[in-house]
Image (tube, grey):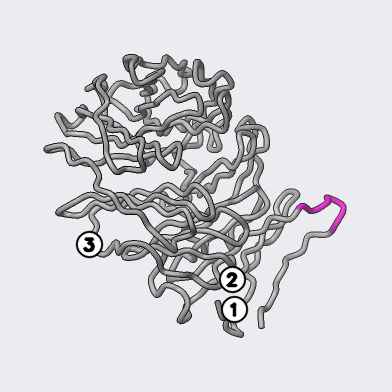
């Protein structure tokens, strides 16, 4: 991408033992999208994927140039995607007439299209792939405001055909999604009206019944409505279960497993429960089982949100969180996607483009500085 002479490195001052800087690497030009990204997923320091409201984009040079690729999203009512690598991605597009799955393994040069299942009165809620040929789609039917009928369909041939899994899913609760761990166990997450209860079901194999997974909840959460997202596994033993306090928009607490999901234990909250009314986590992610990040915004004393998020990191699987940056510059970002706890990418809070986020260690004996770079 051609950078204008006025593009500059936006800066953060120092907090604690790290400096974070935002470097403009993508803006408005003939080679970039004219509208803002709604999702980004960078897979390396140079390569990644992005979605706007109408199109799919791929970059191989850290966002300096974007290539439009894949199907149009213009008339879609829902889009699900799963980015597996710099070259491989699945995109499911739902519109008023059909639901289709698109897959590429060569960075978007060629796409394979197939029809998704269309069970009557049901809508696609989630889709996940564990192999280029093996995937699972979750469909739900609203029964009551707090209960859904759900069905899982599976494919073994890249979506050319789908079969309905025989064992029925529990009717109780609203389903948030499914995931499949490396040991091929399936997981169903969501929420219910019951307080102090974490909603999670496991199916050991396709022939076994779905069983609830008992998870101990600490006393401070006994009166809260809890909502889970599907667990994220990094290998056959280690995984993270995100649990949100008071619904999908609540603050996350991450539960960890080291035995393939037979048990989950809570880690430390980014926002302590007693401070939940004054601060909130807007974005988060884990790059490995031990390393993760979270973007926290403090609420103003007058009750309004102060537009000043702070980046936190963990290097021990969420047991401790450390602030990395101060507020001023991070107020300029929209979406955040960290590759590691040192390098990531973000979108501007307004308009198109991409920002590179770098976090550099600072020794305590060095004086505090701010960094600024002007690009020619």
In the image, 77: left or right of 327? left
Which quarter of the rendering shows the N terminus? bottom right
Residue 154 on the magenta span = no
**Residue 309 seen in render:** no
Q: CA distance from mark 1 to mark 2?
A: 6 Å
**Does residue 118 show up?**
yes
User: Counting other residues with Cα less than 10 Å from the Cα at mark 1, is it few (<14), some (14-19), or many (20 or more)?
Assistant: some
Write the start and end of the magenta stretch as one range: 361-366
Say few, some or many: other residues with alpha carbon within 10 Å of mark 2 (under 14 / 14 to 19 / 20 or more).
many
Q: Position of residue 4 (x, y in %)?
A: 57, 83
38 left or right, relative to 142: right
N-terminal of the pair, mark 1 or mark 3, is 1
Residue at the spot 42% in from the left edge and 56% down from the top edge: 39
Q: Is residue 191 above or below residue 55?
A: above
- State which tag comes first along the sequence, 1 or 2: 1
Residue 211's image quarter? top left
Q: Which residue is mark 1?
A: 7
Quadrant of image for the C terminus: bottom right
Q: Can you identify the residue that label 2 sits on?
A: 24
Q: Element type at marker 2?
A: strand
The foreground one among 167 and 188 is 167
How far apart are the alpha carbons under marks 1 and 3? 34 Å
Q: Secondary structure at mark 3?
A: loop
Q: Residue 75, labelled with which disc?
A: 3
Residue 11, horizontal then vertical, whole percent: 65, 66
Front residue (pair 341, 72): 72
């Amino acid at each position: 991408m051609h950078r204008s002479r006025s593009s500059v490195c936006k800066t953060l001052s120092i907090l604690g033992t790290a400096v974070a800087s935002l470097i403009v690497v993508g803006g408005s030009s003939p080679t970039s999208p004219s509208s803002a990204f709604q999702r980004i997923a960078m897979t390396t320091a140079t390569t990644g994927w992005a979605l706007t409201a109408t199109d799919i984009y791929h970059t191989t040079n850290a966002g300096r140039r974007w290539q439009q690729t894949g199907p149009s999203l213009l008339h879609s009512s829902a889009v699900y995607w799963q980015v597996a690598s710099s070259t491989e991605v699945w995109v499911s597009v739902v519109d008023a007439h059909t639901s289709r799955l698109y897959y590429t393994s060569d960075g978007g040069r060629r796409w394979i299209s197939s029809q998704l299942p269309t069970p009557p009165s049901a809508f696609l809620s989630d889709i996940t792939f564990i192999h280029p040929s093996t995937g699972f789609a979750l469909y739900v039917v609203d029964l009551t405001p707090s209960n859904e009928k759900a069905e899982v369909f599976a494919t073994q041939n890249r979506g050319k055909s789908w079969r309905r899994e025989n064992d029925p899913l529990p009717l109780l609760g609203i389903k948030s999604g499914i995931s499949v761990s490396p040991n091929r166990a399936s997981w169903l997450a969501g929420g219910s009206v019951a307080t102090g209860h974490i909603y999670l079901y496991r199916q050991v194999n396709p022939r076994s019944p779905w069983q609830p997974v008992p998870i101990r909840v600490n006393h401070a959460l006994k009166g809260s409505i809890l909502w889970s997202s599907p667990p994220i596994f990094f290998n056959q033993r280690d995984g993270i279960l995100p649990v949100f306090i008071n619904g999908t928009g609540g603050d996350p607490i991450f539960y960890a497993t080291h035995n393939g999901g037979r048990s989950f234990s809570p880690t430390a909250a980014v926002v302590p429960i007693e401070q939940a009314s004054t601060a909130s986590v807007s974005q988060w992610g884990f790059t490995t089982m031990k390393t993760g990040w979270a973007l926290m915004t403090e609420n103003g004393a007058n009750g309004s949100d102060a537009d000043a998020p702070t980046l936190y990191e963990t290097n021990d699987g969420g047991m401790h969180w450390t602030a990395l940056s101060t507020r001023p510059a991070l107020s300029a970002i929209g979406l955040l996607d960290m590759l590691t706890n040192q390098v990531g990418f973000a979108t501007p809070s307004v308009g198109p483009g991409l920002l590179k986020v770098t976090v550099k260690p600072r020794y305590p004996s060095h004086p505090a500085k701010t960094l600024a770079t002007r690009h020619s």
